[in-house]
Image (spheres, grey):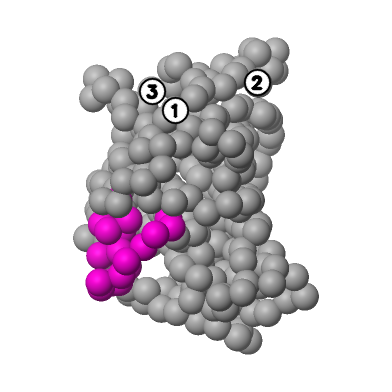
Amino acid sequence: MNSSEDMKSWIGKSIKNEDYISDFPVRAMSSVFDYENENFIEVPYGWHWLYFLNLPLQKNLGPDGHEKRIGFMPPIELPIRMYAGGEINYFKPILIGEKLKKTSSIISIENKEGSTGNLIFLKIKHEIANKKEILINEIQNLVYREDKKSQKTKSAIGINAPKNFDYEKSWQTTPEMLFRYSALTHNVHKIHYDFPYATGVEGYPQIVVHGPLMATFLLDLISNILTYKQKLIKFTFRLKSPVFVGGTIFAQAIKTKNGLDLWIKDQNGYQSLTAEAVIIN
């Protein structure tokens, strides 16, 4: 897909999917997060990514592990796909035992020239609803880039994480954790488990911690901060730099007028995924 006209033809396309919100994914995720004997009635913030999973046929997987660009996803020719961030608006909680519908729509495709070469930004809107109302509205931002051989060289200079924060929770990232999260979300992108592919093809020094998993670390911190009267209504996040497996990373937050500013501090003290949370009483 090279021409802007071809790309525009994909805007507005949508797909619908139904799922039953069973308790098993939540119980499984609880074990990953070391929650023991928790009795969840609602799906925690960020754990909606455990449902409405894309289940491509094995023969339809591409060399990166993702489904080949067929069907709903536009046939973008740039080979490397990354999760860049998004926005989640929370209206009502997802209750375990519900049968819900998810509608996904492509809302924009933009071709840009970045510091490392050609980039295409894809924005997808997801709505999760019951028969009466929308529960979650989410914008997902994906970016496609050239492969390692075609990219221009860019010096990697990390941005130090802020020294001041009001809240913090630490996480040990391990290959086992990444494997379990990949399994629970049916994420077969090889950068999260295939060391030779992650280093040799996509040019990373190690396997990569999932962007949504890091967002979920921050959402977990928010859940620990909120009082019983408070409610998260909006969470916006952006992945500034990848985090690699191994060692301790930190979910940190500072109070703001409308809620919280949050970020992930990696093993080297650099700021990675950043986020803003709007909280109401």
Q: Residue at x 54, y 33 (%)?
A: 131
Q: Position of residue 220 (x, y in %)?
A: 46, 68
Q: Nearer the viewer, residue 249 or 268?
A: 249
> What is the quadrant of the N terminus in the image?
top right
Mark 3 lies on residue: 68
Numbered badge on residue 17: 1
User: Is residue 28 within the magenta segment?
Assistant: yes
* Amino acid tagged 2: Gly
3D distance between C-alphas at marks 3 and 1: 19 Å
Q: Earlier in the sequence, mark 3 or mark 1?
A: 1
Residue range highlighted in magenta: 25-43
Amino acid type shown at disc 1: Asn
**Cα separation between marks 1 and 2:** 16 Å
Density class for disc 1 (Cα within 10 Å; few <14, some 14-19, many ≥20) is: few
Q: Residue at x 26, y 57 (%)?
A: 28
Q: Is residue 208 magenta?
A: no
